[in-house]
Amino acid sequence: MKYLLLKHYRGGPTPTPNGAILMDQWTPEEVSDHIAFMRHVADTFRERGEFVDAQALSPEGTFVRYDADGKPPVTDGPFAETKDLIAGWMIIDVDSVERAHEAAAYLSSAPGKDGRPLQEWIEVRPFMEEPPTVTD
Amino acid sequence: MEELLRDLTPQVLGVLVRRGADFAAAEDAVQEALVEAVRRWPDDPPAEPRGWLITVAWRKFIDARRSEVARHRRELADLEEPVPGPTEQRDDTLRLLFLCCHPSLTPGSAVALTLRAVGGLTTRQIAEAYLVPEATMAQRISRAKRTIGAADVGQPGDLRTVLKVLYLIFNEGYTGEVDLAAEAIRLTRQLAASSDEPEVAGLLALMLLHHARRTARFTDDGALVPLADQDRARWDTAAIAAGVEILQAALARDRLGEYQAQAAIAALHADAPSAAETDWTQVLEWYDELARLTDSPVVALNRAVAVGEVDGPLAGLRAVERVPDDVPRHTAVRAYLHERAGDLSVAHELYARAARQATSAAERDHLTRQAARTRSSV
């Protein structure tokens, strides 16, 4: 079963006190430690045979929609203060939802300010699967 | 030659493991023997390909052990052994299968290792079938090998786990270039050839009967077609006949199990010339048997559908009420029964809710269409 582990810049439940301290208030070493930990998490999932993909997103994007035939796409944004902002994701392939939650919690234990666990909320979303062959 | 080597690889691996080689070393030795076969067979085909491979793989293993053992200054004269006969041959593949489906492995690891070691698929093929990077699959397989290396090899897994793993592979269908359902059938057929356990035959029959409907399960553009709406002319009658025959022989042994009961239900559906002619009374009887064998809520839910067909949708709805509502397709079944009862507005609400709860895109799209259909006819 594949799960998307979503990291949000903003949005989701109220951050814990550790998670509320923004990265620009950390020391350079704390930032490096955080990034090294994230790499370590990906390596751990790889080593366990669970890793599928990881990507970071640039924080600024644009909303785009179709308008009418022959007309250019309509764009909107970027919005400085959208409620929800996705920072990036990791995709894992695991045997159970319990394991997916454990993996997300591990990701969330990444060190932040003063090396304390960031306790960042990670959104866990199951992928749609193939319909099973045996149904009756 | 490729096909032959793929068939022989698990057998040879099984022989080496039975003779006491640890899994990783045995696999290395078999790989080396395969390389040599590819190099030498085109000019000098062996009379006994299997014997040739076993001999060469065993020598490779002994050589590797010798150089290792030389460091440990030990004697290994007792490792030379003759090539086994045909009975042992089946046992070796079987032993390998049981080892790969060891209960100490997670289902995902057992599936990967079985496809690699017994199925002879490449790591890349398995990775593609399960839509993960090749490096991830390689890692999953090597971890699985380490786990069974540490497990007591004298105690291979139990049949229940083996059947479960084969069932999981079958149920995955196919997403990549590898047809996992066909692969599961091939492996189960091998197992059935050397096992007199009726549940093995039951599982094989179940697979064949469902595989027979495969081309009718989806429209050309990938939309799900439910059993009642399938074009039965597209069902594979040869596969159905084979499945029914295997099932009948298994049932005659009078040791009923879950897979046989499930296959019996599939056989009744396969036997009906049209959905309207389905013998639902018998289907329900088999669900009653199945419910005695397992307390699975999925079975209870499917049984409720059969109750709805036999005793009417209201009786079906009463049966659904006794099934925990977190079972997948619970809402979809209620929607269907309400529609049958003529309560279209409730059916519409429930189809829409079922679509939001669906765990596959094909089911979601199907349920969304059902919701749209019941709304427009209100």
Image: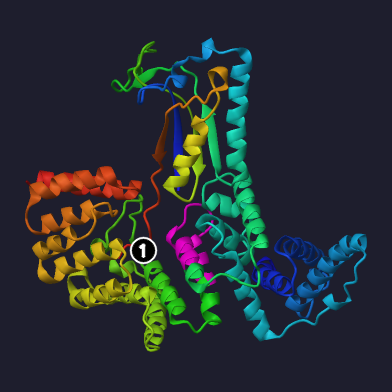
Q: Kindly state the secondary structure of the residue where label 1 is placed.
A: loop
Residue behind mark 1: A134
Q: How many marks?
A: 1
Which residue is pictured at 63% across the width and 45% down the height? B135
- In reply to whether residue B179 is colored magenta, the answer given is yes
Residue B337, how many percent across, how many down? 14, 58
Left or right relative to B202: residue B6: right
B248 on left or right of B28? left
Residue at left 67%, top 73%? Answer: B11
Q: Is residue A115 above or below residue B259?
A: above
Q: Depth check: B198 or A117 in front?
A: A117
Magenta stretch, main secondary structure, is helix
In front: B311, or B46?
Answer: B311
Q: Could you classify mark 1 by the number of other residues whose Cα lies within 10 Å: few (under 14), some (14-19), or many (20 or more)?
A: some
Q: Residue at x 56, y 82 (%)?
A: B194
Taking B135 as reference, is B334 left or right? left
Whole-percent x, y for residue B80 in the image: 84, 77
Tell me which amino acid carries mark 1: Val
Residue B41 visible? The answer is no
Q: Nearer the viewer, residue B11 or A101?
A: A101
- Magenta region: which residues? B164-187
